[in-house]
Image (cartoon, rainbow, N blue to C red):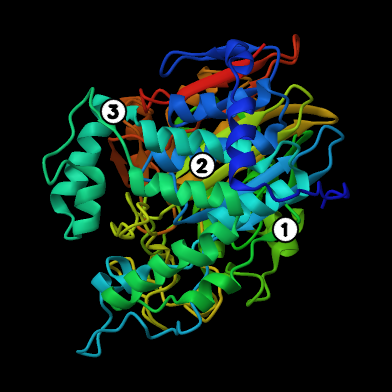
Amino acid sequence: MHSSAPNLRRSVPLGAALLLTAALAAPLAAQQVVQGAPGETIRTAGGMVVSEHPEASRAGAEVLAAGGNAVDAAIATGFALAVTHPSAGNIGGGGFMVIRFPDGATTALDFREKAPARAHPEMFVGADGEYSSEIHHRSHLAVGVPGTVAGFDKAHRLYGSMNWERLVYPSVVLAEDGFVLSERLAGSIARFVERTPYEATIQAYSRDGVPYAAGDTLRQWDLAGSMRRIMLNRSAGFYEGETARLIAEEMRRGGGIIDEGDLLAYRARERAPIQGEYRGYQVISMPPPSSGGVAMVEMLEILEGYDIEALGHNTSRSVHLMAEAMRRAYRDRAVYLADPDYVDVPVHRLTSEEHAATRRATIDRTRASVSTPADVEMGYESLETTHYSVVDADGLAVSVTYTLEAGYGSGIVVPGAGFLLNNEMGDFNGRPGLTNESGLIGTEPNLARPGQRMLSSMTPTILAQGDRLVAVIGSPGGRTIINTVLQLVLNIVDHRMGFPEAVEAGRIHHQWLPDRIRAEEGALSGSTVQALENMGHTLSVGGSQGLAHSILVDPLTGERVGTPDARNPDAGAAGHR
């Protein structure tokens, strides 16, 4: 962990805070910002932010232009996404942050949600004594204690440089004044509101049940109030007082078990990142309770034994080896990985060269292995998460992935508070011993227990070479996240791709079970698909995988190359001169 002393903050009264935020939001910073069109790759010599929404990227870039560092910008971007990207941006969820400092030191912040004090392994069993997917994923019992606000507060106290109020202020403005809905976002919100049973949710995201349309302005008054309480009182403005009361009231109304004590007890954790080396590059990623860093480094260690560059990008021979490495790492994920505060996770063994050599020795270069439910079946994990990347002018790099779990989380907007709650308890295993062919898993390490953090696939990652920052990468996508980030590393290191080529290249996925390779439409040629089937693989082709909003540092000029993943045409990059 980085040894820099925390940057101390003083509290600011309401009147002073409003004057301060108005002053710090002055036009000077805005004039220095370079804003790309949605989906456009841009270059700047200064700092850069790439996220799911242009307004959020701009909020972060303006912080950089005003003298804030990358941690400050990541906080501002994250709060802005809580307004502009409601399906995954959040203050009612949680996630992870990986940081690399200009001197090469690293650290990670864990603000994953936690199980409330009354949680237990059998809590997702219905009145009939059987496991209930509805309870597990779509009820008030599916809500974990949120971590995002505590995580951003901790990151700021440790490594921020700008006043807290200035970082939250853009989200207050975006919520109060509103922002214009794109066609994609308006359609997504309309579909969500159509299926929600919750009145507060309908009021927050429609006009009394009438859907918003593209070009409409979405204003969120209750959310603005919640953001203002966070702006003035830091994490106490969320975990105590009015917001905490409103959360606890909604839990009691809906049969949930989170109370004021659970909120007050929540703490974010600073952890040592997972670090691996791949062909001379340092791979810095998130440790447990995320499985992403461990699984990705294990796969890279396995693949380092092959000449991936010579095999070619997305050829049958390279895809076969990738799928076999994925197959083995995902099985290890299910057997060993969980919250390290509750389970002894063998991180060093799983990421070691010796373990990789053992796994590599079981791979036949000409035939697919076979996965069976008797080994371990992988459970459900939503594709809805969001990732963003930040680099400042000094080379401080921040990679953040956070989520509500499913798209729009539990679907529950807290009445009077205006934000959605997560359904992250769905990432715990459903019930002890319940492992079957339908995709449920019941292994011991990742069962719901009081205070335990649920296992995640989020993989915020930073790539470096010696003392040089190379890239800040990550993605949403549930269990596909790890493999998306893996392929970004392979594209940069083995296939020598620049940006945006490395981000736009077609992706594949294998997660042990179901025993098949999933490939994006157009990722593999017809002859490659046929060759893989001849090797014994089952393939499913179609759809898209991940949204890898990333930053590459040009090795010749030092410019930051901000690349929104074109799979979301609304995503945006913003930097400063």
Between marks 3 and 1, how big is the CA–CA gap? 36 Å
Regarding residue 466, the answer to whether it shows in the image is yes
Left or right of 96 in this view: 418: left
Residue type of the residue flagged with mark 2: Phe
Circles 3 and 1, Cβ within 8 Å, touching? The answer is: no
Q: Is residue 332 above or below residue 324?
A: below
Pick the front one: 144 or 217: 217
Mark 2 neighbour density, 10 Å: few (under 14) some (14–19) many (20 or more): many
**Residue position marked by numbered label 1 in the rendering:** 270
Q: Residues within 10 Å of mark 3 (few under 14, many from 20)?
A: some
* Residue at horizontal 67 percent and vertical 11 percent from the top: 577
Nearer to me, 499 or 254: 254
The 10 Å Cα crowd at callout 1, few under 14, some 14 to 19, many 20 or more, is many
Label 1, label 2: how far apart the Cα atoms are: 20 Å
**Residue type marked 3:** Leu
Q: Residue at x 63, y 61 (%)?
A: 288
In the picture of the structure, the residue carrying the numbered disc 2 is 79
Q: Residue 444 — which label?
A: none
Q: Secondary structure at mark 1?
A: strand
Where is residue 87 shown, x and y percent of the image? Answer: 34, 45
Q: Can residue 84 be seen here?
A: no
Image coordinates for residue 283, horizontal then vertical, percent:
71, 41
- Please give left or right for residue 516 compared with residue 48 in the image: left
Kindly identify which residue carries mark 3: 181
- Residue farthest along the front direction in this orientation: 15
Tell me which numbered mark, 1 or 2, is placed earlier along the sequence.
2
Is the residue under label 2 in contact with that under label 1 (CB below 8 Å)? no
> Which of label 3 and label 1 is nearer to you?
3
Q: Which comes before the other along the chain, label 2 or label 3?
A: 2
Mark 3 or mark 1: which comes first in sequence?
A: 3
